[in-house]
Amino acid sequence: MFHWLEKNPFFFAVGIFVVIAYAGVITILPDFMNSARPVVGTKPYTVLQLAGRHVYIKDSCNACHSQLIRPFKSETDRYGMYSLSGEYAYDRPFLWGSKRTGPDLMRVGNYRTTDWHEHHMLDPASVVPGSIMPHYKHMFSNEADIETAYAEALTVKKVFNTPYDEAGMPKLGTFDESKKIVLAEAKAIVDDMKSPEVKEAFAKGKIKEIVAIIAYLNSLK
Amino acid sequence: MEMETIRELQAYGYAFASVFFALILYGYVYHLYTSKKKGGTDYEKYSNMALNDGLDDTPIEKIEPLQEEKQMRSNK
Amino acid sequence: MQSSNMINYDYSVAKLFTIATIVFGIVGMTIGVLIAFQMAYPELNNLAGEYGTFGRLRPLHTDTVIFGFILSGVWATWYYIGQRVLKVSMAESPFLMILGKLHFWLYILGVVAVVVTLFMGITTSKEYAEFEWPIDIAIVIVWVIWGMSIFGLIGIRREKTLYISVWYYIATFLGVAMLYLFNNMEVPTYLVTGLGDWWHSVSMYAGTNDAMVQWWYGHNAVAFVFTVPIIAMIYYFLPKESGQPIFSYKLSLLSFWGLMFVYLWAGGHHLLYSTVPDWVQTMGSIFSVVLILPSWGSAINMLLTMKGEWQQLKENPLIKFMVLASTFYMFSTLEGPIQAIKSVNALAHFTDWIPGHVHDGTLGWVGFMIIAALLHMAPRMYKREIYSKKLLELQFWLQTTGIVLYFSSMWIAGITQGMMWRATDQYGNLAYSFIDTVTVLHPYYTIRGVGGLFYLVGFFMFAYNFYKTMTASKVIGEEPQSTSPMAA
């Protein structure tokens, strides 16, 4: 039987595939069905926060920052309560990261403010002496892509039944309705900021990337 | 299905497949190392496939091309 | 067969992929050295506005090296080894020739799309799977074409039994295909809503599930690219270059299955659930260890192949590269499981020890093996001797020093960082603020950058040597049976 298999590439390939696939099914699938349900109080991101999350991904913040607090005292002392599976229920994709060149950001919203982020993104070393993080001045001139963020929110609502528009959850509505909500949310952040460039743009109804990413970072709690 | 049951099935699936694959693997080891004695294949000869790999070298075990392929090849 | 006297092996596709390997190697490693120095000297982030920051460049580095350099190397060697061990020329089948060329050009198109989108910041953020859905589709097409070309060549072979290297190429094809497909399940948002960027998509999996699938892919698929096809190479090139048959062909066969099990089965013991009877659990654990044992066979087999022939190590730089490669293979397969031990992982996770581990494997094992493979192929593809042995020797020592600097500095950096994160004072408060654990690493980041630079300079020397071999070296008459001819 073995010798026959060595000369029949097709069945040989089937053999390899079965071995690989079986292992995958056994190791992955059951945990999958256990797909964690959201922890009480976990809400999907608002459209502005999602747009900020896209900025976070666009500049690969996750290449240097984790969003996963492990259940060790040294980590909970530094970053707060350890992460629960259910807290990530609306994260598509997950942003745990794999390297902590900078600190964890899972609960950064608890201890940093809009003002802090604004200065930090312009010149990290002025806020944290010795920081090796690059500045992100381009976030003050690039515009956030609200339309794509809305498209994503609507997609997850339709395809994965993410509870937008339900009682106590973020409201989505039509794109026009959503834009109004986004502007109101952005206003609260722009008011706390100093950059004249961002303020001027906002007066014309434009939202810069920096506003969106601060909205996202403030939502991480 | 209850998560308990799934977990249990998973554990059985894992344990028994480990045994099954191990048996096959070591059966294969047994086959490899006894094959020559039993008058079957001498596996070591296959290492010559890398050493004598010119187009003109004789294959270790030759495949006869199908009739039409033979014709196609001789047309060249 | 008389007719076969008139045809020769056709290396045109292998040559194309060889050039691609060298070009992508240079690009990927140059970006790597730049981002290594960015960690020591952050001003280097400002060279090209938003397009030059560490965040944008890091995926470009990993993807260019993995999918550019390594995959091109895998395909260059496949289109070389495949024909030879199956004893059939691609020139015998116009269909396979067209397929091979299509494979190459579509792939190049895909790489260009990847480079452009990653610079623009279009990414799904999943490591080594950053590409958005249109590129994913292109990748699947390229992969399917490769599969057709593998099985097409096998279909017209003259040698009935498949050589061990072919097994490994088949496994690479199947393993990566499955892992890639599952990890990249995503919903294009424009198709659902008609709004926003058309290339944007959202992952089918959320949160913890997404992480699970990603790292099932991240470790296994990358391991499939870093290990399986590279073993395919060493099983052909080391015996061929040294003129020695594999020490034990039988061992090579069974360690193949050992490896198939190790990647997909290892770590599975944590699945054993407590409500299952003890004896089932014990049996499961014991047998999973038994399964994984033979996977070490390959490295041992390679070293034993050189038994009684160690003088070649001194005389032939290609043997030097390959023997050191298999040593690094053993080294990093030992380091991996150590990092997987729970208490070690608690310290090492998220630190620089992890990139350190990856680079032992990629620089030492993968890089050296691909370099040796291309150099072995060169005299046979271009009918010229290798241009300079002296340059090759220098390259070897420079790159080896580079690797040692790289992994030793990252070990120290990783462990220092891990220890400082958890250090407490006498009252149990954290002893260091986060920034303390960053600034302390500056010397190690510098050393790492220098190590990477050494390796890169060595790679440029290789590229130069290779170019000269192609164009200016002495023409040889007959194809060498084993040792590759080279000028002093």
Image (tube, coloured by chain):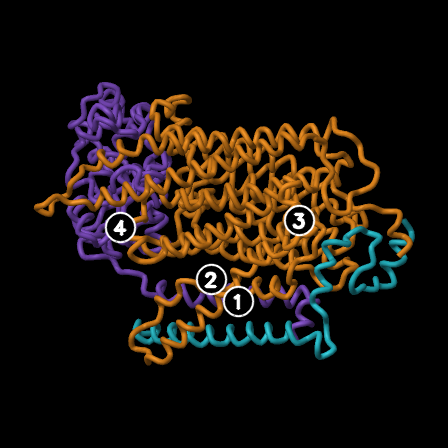
Chain colours: A purple, B cyan, C orange
Q: Which quadrant holds residue C147?
A: bottom right
Indicate the position of residue C281 as horizontal and vertical percent values.
36, 75
**Residue at position x 57%, y 54% from top?**
C172
User: Dot 2 surroundings within 10 Å: few (below 14), some, or many (20 or more)?
Assistant: many
Subunit ID for the residue under disc 1: A
Q: Nearer the viewer, residue C398 or C162?
A: C398
- Residue placed under numbered mark 4 in the picture: A164
Q: Nearer the viewer, residue B10 or B16?
A: B16
Residue kind at label 3, given as amino acid type: Phe
- Residue placed under numbered mark 1 in the picture: A19
C-alpha gap between disc 1 and disc 4: 41 Å
Q: Secondary structure at mark 3?
A: helix
- Residue placed under numbered mark 3 in the picture: C237
Q: Image height check: is C276 above or below A96?
A: below
Query: Is residue C253 visible to the viewer in this orientation of the structure?
Result: yes
Query: Is residue C119 visible to the viewer in this orientation of the structure?
Result: no
C-alpha gap between disc 4 and disc 2: 38 Å
